[in-house]
Amino acid sequence: MERIKQGHAVSKGIGLGRAFVYKRYIPLKKISYIEDKDVESAFARYHEILQKAHQEIDDIRQSLEQKGDDKAKIFTAHLDILHDIALEEMIEQYIKQEHFSIAYAVHEAFDMFIEIIGQVEDELIRERVADLKDVKNRVLRIEEGLPETNLSRLSEPSIIIADDLYPSDTATLDRTFVEALITEIGGVTSHTAIIAKSYEIPAILGIEGVMKTIEHGTFVIADAIKGELIIHPDAKTTDEYTIKKKEYKAKQTLLKTYLPLKPITQDLIKVEVTLNIGSASDEELSFVPYVDGVGLFRSEFLYMENDHLPTEDEQYHVYAKALKAFGEKPVILRTLDIGGDKELSYLTLPKEDNPFLGCRAIRLCFEHPEILKTQLRAALRASVYGNLWLMFPMVGSIDDIEKIHHAVGEAKASLDHENIMYSQNVKVGVMIEIPSLILIADHVAKMVDFASIGTNDLCQYLTAVDRLNPLVSSYYQSYSPAMFRIIKMAIDAFNKEHKPISVCGELGGDPIAAPILLGLGMRKISMAKSSVARIKKIITSHQMTTFSQVADHILKLTKEKDVIDYVQSVLKLED
Ligand code: PEP
Ligand code: MG
């Protein structure tokens, strides 16, 4: 029977397909032994498991290689680990001499290597721990007879159902067959939402208990316009949605005609529309002709998709590619924003009760100055190829700004010392995400070259609502008059100093919020690729005076719902 589950539609669209229930495999360690008579057969079975693991890893490696994806190298390294002689000998000894069961032997041998390598001084070697864990889990999963649940190889149109997705999952996602993403955790501004938007994959997040409700292989429909997941749809619903999907795609194609337009209002006010990117992939860079630059390069994706801290050279090549592609157009590169919900498998972060209020982003970089210095040197070296603006996340005080200037100064001095060139025109700016920074925005505007408002975190810190917690998502009111009042303070302070200010949080590409932001005096808004055409349509079909009147009016309102209703009624926004 047809059933419907409700969640948040964070990336619009419609998908039809089989549910691919994605459970990350977590092995359980049990002490267990085998009898003497079973030793030989256990050892033979262990070799069969190795062969299967080899086949799986090699298949992924080859498919990545065919796509020209650099991540193929990771899987070559996994093959090396799988066939490491010392590891194999230890497992053989555990099975043959100590009579450990296969699983127990694999656990013990890998854990010993993980411990030894985890203590090595050399960071590059230490980072191999993540790979060891990955290979260990694969071997143990095969031993348990469980199938591979890898999102990089789907065989039919699929709707991914997961509790949450990590960047490592989305990085290897087989996009030819993904119809939609559904998760239990996560809201509009979670990283799964950001990825889904950037890849234009329909996504509904925050559906509580969805993993328990749906069986792998069940036919489902994701209506990521209404935020509904339809389980076991009947033939009539399936037919309706097949048509709806076609219509939606046709509408999107029509909307794309707005892409090449200059974002100028009907009363001839120019707005800058820039792009939020997470990599310098050809797909992201294909939007160069349609935008005025990059308003947010989330550099942490480069770190999260890797199995080690990217070296200065690795980073340099990525930044240089983006800067060359955008030429004179500014590229705002945000320094590493890790912590909170974003982890690195190879970097142990402190355990904190409130990670979103803890050692994240720039605070974490201040704790690890060598990581920040490597990134700044890489970016500065790449700056000779384009127009680099360096931006720092989670800045909360003037002390932070002073430390940032110091760190940039040190990175420059080290390059000077080695006679390495960098542009003299690199701008240094801050993200405005913490309300304390807005209350002193007049001072801030004098100390930096530019600012960009991260509305995703600003809303979290202004309303005291965890941006990922579905239990309190109704309190996360990013259209509330309080948000626009505080944003106005920042805009006014920067406009007074004639310093550029922009918005790079989700509100920048949001059809309700963008007109208000423009009406408040913002002249640069940044967004995911999927929002550019729609926002350009809104800009080019209205007058800036209308946006100003809308903004003046909503500042007098008291409730979020009134803001939404008012903007929709005045601007007649469609779905
Ligand atoms: C923000 O907080 O609005 C922002 C753009 O940063 P992120 O979503 O990556 O935290
Ligand atoms: Mg943020």
Image (spheres, grey):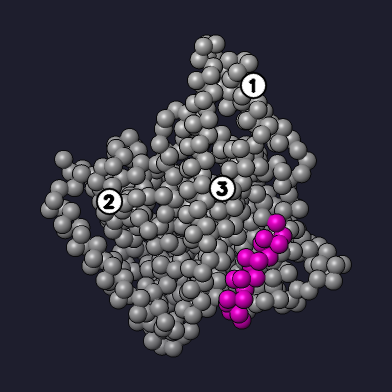
Per the image, the residue denoted by label 2 is 17
Image height of 138 relative to 375, above or below:
above
Q: Which mark is residue 297?
A: none
What's under tag 1, amino acid-wise? Gln
Spot the residue most to the top.
Answer: 36
Q: Residues within 10 Å of mark 1 (few under 14, many from 20)?
A: some
Query: Quarter-wise, where is residue 203 in the image?
Result: bottom left
Local crowd at mark 3 within 10 Å, few (<14), some, or many (≥20)?
Answer: many
Residue ranking furthest to the bottom = 268
Q: Which residue is mark 3?
A: 75
Amino acid type of the residue that numbered disc 3 sits on in the rendered structure: Phe
Q: Quadrant of the C terminus?
A: bottom left
Above or below, comparing residue 138 to residue 336 in the picture: above
566 or 574, nearer to the observer: 574
Of 292 and 506, the residue lying toward us: 292
Task: Identify the amino acid type marked 2.
Answer: Gly
Circles 2 and 3, Cβ within 8 Å, touching? The answer is: no
Q: Residue at the spot x=31%, y=73% of the render?
A: 253
Residue that carries the numbered disc 1 in the rendered image = 93
Q: Residues within 10 Å of mark 2 (few under 14, many from 20)?
A: many
Q: Is residue 335 left or right of residue 573?
A: right
Q: Residue at x 55, y 53 (%)?
A: 72
SS majority, magenta: helix
Instruction: Report if residue 315 lies within the magenta region.
Output: yes
Q: Are marks 3 and 1 in contact (CB under 8 Å)?
A: no
In front here: 273 or 14? 14
- Give me the C-alpha separation between circle 3 and circle 1: 27 Å
Q: Is residue 44 above or below residue 475?
A: above
Residue drawn at (46%, 32%) of the image: 142
Please report the bounds of the magenta region as a residue range: 311-330
- SS at badge 1: helix
